[in-house]
Amino acid sequence: MKVAYIFATSKHTVSYVLGRMILPQLEEDRHGVDVVGMFFFEDNNYVLVKGNPLGQRLATVAKSKGVLLMGCDQCCYEREIADKLIEGASIGCFPDLYKALAGNMPDQVITL
Amino acid sequence: MSAEHTSHLKAKTEDHGDTRQLSAFECLMRGFRRNGGPLLAIVGRVAHDGDGRTAQFSVEVEDGVIKAVSFAVSTCATLIAYCEFVAEGVTGATLSRAVALTPEQVIAPLKGIPPHKYDCARLATTALRGAVEIALNGGQK
């Protein structure tokens, strides 16, 4: 099964759910499904900024497994990080996300 | 790009005494307010890009000078920011100057936008030209 994750809520969504569950499991090749994309809202976008240790690991995994990384464009402009993202991460909105995933559509989109 | 042109393309802040450069986000927020507003006297052609985005400008002109600008564009943050930057930059400009505006002249001063979004600047300037050319033609399409 192919899934895409949308990181919509703040609190510890990225540091805990992504950083301590999803990402390590992807690195260990035991997440259980193919992750085809991750989309980030609001402060969750800071993980995509160059120099973020979690983001650097995420970039490595994304590159090796072909995972789309996209930040919400408005969120990134508001935080003035749109042009400071890790290699491979882009910004956009829903049309950009769906277009980018068109060739590799997920079976499930999971909002966290 | 000439210094005159550069200074003209600096979007103006709410406080008219402040001439600092606006950020992409400030242009976006102001563009949200302008987008979809009432059409002005001269309505331009609708410009399209390959991703389904559209943009259309309308302008009010007096003695060859753009007095007011309105636009209606797709809900794309980068496109709205660029269109707002263009709208503020050409308000008060002559038609001959506005019609010569290039995407590069918009991309360079509006910082913080990643290169893969620069095509939105092309759509914004194409849409502006679609209105200005009609104005230059005396309002005839």
Image: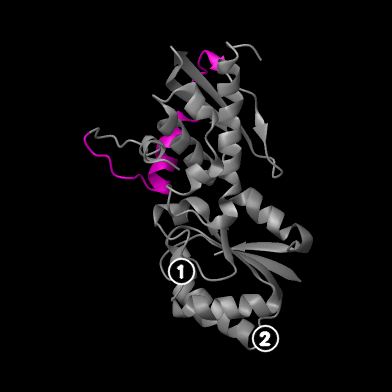
Is residue A41 shown left or right of residue B119? Answer: left
Q: Nearer the viewer, residue B94 or B15?
A: B94
Which chain does tag 1 point to?
A
* Magenta extent: B17-42
Residue A27 visible in image: yes
Residue that mark 2 sits on: A30
Quadrant of the rendered image containing residue B43: top right
Question: Is B117 left, or right, of A2 in this rendering?
Answer: left
From this view, report whether residue A1 is shown above or below residue B70.
below
Q: Are marks 2 and 1 on the same chain?
A: yes
Residue placed most toward the observer, A37 or B68? B68
Question: Looking at the image, is A96 positioned above or below residue A59?
Answer: above
Asked whether disc 2 touches disc 1, contact meaning CB atoms under 8 Å apart, the reply is no
Query: Which of B57/A92 is in front?
Result: B57
Residue B96 x/y as whole percent: 50, 24
Residue at x 55% of width, y 42% of height: B103
> Does the magenta segment cover residue A111?
no
Q: Amino acid at mark 1?
A: Val
**SS assignment at label 1:** loop
Which residue shows up at 61% across the image and 47% down it?
Answer: B119
Q: Secondary structure at mark 2?
A: loop
Chain bearing tag 2 is A
> Residue A85 at x, y = what percent?
49, 66
Q: Residue at x 41, y 26 (%)?
A: B91
Label at residue A49: 1
On the image, the x and y values in percent for residue A24 come to: 57, 84
Q: Amino acid at mark 2?
A: Arg
Quadrant placement of the N terminus of chain B: top left
Picture coordinates of residue B83, whole percent (x, y): 50, 36
